[in-house]
Image (cartoon, grey):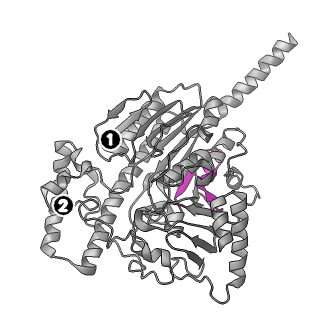
Amino acid sequence: MKYLLFLGLALLSFFSIYAQRPNIVLIVSDDHSYQTIGAYGGKFMQTPNIDRIAKEGIRFDKAYVTNSICGPSRAVILTGKYSHKNGFKDNANSSFDGSQNTFIKELTKTGYQTAWIGKWHLQTNPQGFTYWQVLPGQGSYYNPDFLMMNGERKRVDGYVSDVVEDAAEKWLSERDPSQPFCLVIGHKNTHRTWMPDTKDLRLFNQSTFPLPANFYDSYETRAAAAVQDMTIDKTMRMGYDLKMFGSKEEEDKEFSIKRMTPSQRKAYMTFYDSIHADLQSKKLSGKELVEWKYQRYMQDYLATAASLDRNIGRTLDFLDKHELSKNTIVIYVSDQGFYMGEHGWFDKRFMYEESFRTPMVMRYPGVVKSGSVNSNMVMNLDIGPTLLDAAGIKVPNDMQGKSFLPLIKGSAKKGRDAMYYHYYENGEHSVSPHFGISTGRYKLIRFYTRVSGWELFDLEKDPSEMRNIYGQKGYEKVKADLKKKLAQLIDQYEDEEAKKILVIH
């Protein structure tokens, strides 16, 4: 009798703890810059729903990525391991090995219902989830196709951020309410080619945005920056990117346009054709044309961000309506940062701040104090371990990230004193592969393959990273200390490729 009583109490205790485990909603966007978010002081537009997460939770002011490119970033988030460990180094040559462990698999095997809905971009099908519904490749802004768990390829009419949110809410509505859940919502927005929803086309049409101070960067002292191919001036295409087609035949060649319904296409091209006619009447050239391209880029980019923010609001409203908010962790993060014309660029990849740093806000009722701001250096590498920690699950030994829960609970625990970064892709946009270290004050970068050399920046004196001070007098000790710390992190994270390059030079 006593044994049965003891067993009953033990089971009651177990199920009580089990029931209290937090639900998780992780929202991952694509190429969304912290510069355009209100919570980060952005003045370009309003982002009330991302701001709401920060207001009701915590804003991370020093959140960074290990490798600033879409697919590799998602692989790092899933595995808690650097690219050289999880095997997905770049978008051009990598295919995700789904047999390896992920934070999702750890949640699934301990009773969580797990789902990934939306942009996936890892070449192979998801594994370890109880449900998935993902966009093939980059996905489409209009009437997107989905790869379904049952092997079906399904097209859904509508605008991609709305359609992804609809699918996420459907899964949430149909899940087993007796089990905790972890839902990853992968948004395509704000990825190139920045195609706004038809209802958002005119949102920023009358806005004029100031040029970044270094828009006309000459890239002096920075050899890798000088050979890149990602400028608004030379790389951004009038048709493909800005929808300024020279003919109906050119327009018809764009798959993203052809897949629209007749009504969508009419609304879309009526808007862009009127802009094109106005541009032709102005006969712009030189810097006037470059600056016109910048304004159109910003207007389209921000319009796609508006839909992203609106659908994040729908997620928050769903949680409120179904009384899930109090026991649900919500994290919003971009897969990396993005250039809003700084250095004359769009895109990402470089270890410079606008690309390396990413927006991340988190709401965790009862644990994180509302309106908190965290200045510890955290990385996308840490998201999986943090969520496992919150769920009471031991973090696997091979995960290289660390839970940042102790850092946001008010403990005296010290976080990182430096962050390690490694970018591999040697093709798209002609960005040279590189690895490096940042201490928050100083940044040391080693470029190799396309361009070979070192860069050193004092971020306190030069926050825009315009002046490479590597080899300059007065920085000998700083350089030596950073090289020593870089070697330590390369050893710690077992990056053999970087180790070989470091030995050579």
How many residues crowd mark 2 within 10 Å: few (<14), some (14–19), many (20+)?
Answer: many
Magenta residues (range): 357-383
> Can the viewer see residue 459 in this picture?
no
Residue tagged 2: 245
Q: Is residue 3 left or right of residue 274?
A: right
**Residue 339: x and y, percent?**
43, 67
How many residues crowd mark 1 within 10 Å: few (<14), some (14–19), many (20+)?
Answer: many
For the view shown, which residue lies furthest in the bottom direction?
A: 473
Q: 155 or 430, which lies in front?
A: 430
**Residue 267: x and y, percent?**
18, 50
Residue 46 colored in magenta in the image? no
Query: Quarter-wise, where is residue 284 in the image?
Result: bottom left
Query: Quarter-wise, where is residue 106 in the image?
Result: top right
- Tell me which numbered mark, 1 or 2, is placed earlier along the sequence: 1
Mark 1 lies on a secondary structure that is loop
> Can the viewer see residue 449 in this picture?
yes
Q: Is residue 502 above or below residue 101?
A: below
Specify the quadrant that holds the C terminus: bottom right
**Residue 422: x and y, percent?**
58, 62
Spatial separation of the CA atoms under disc 1 and disc 2: 23 Å
Q: 185 or 310, which lies in front?
A: 185
Residue tagged 1: 144
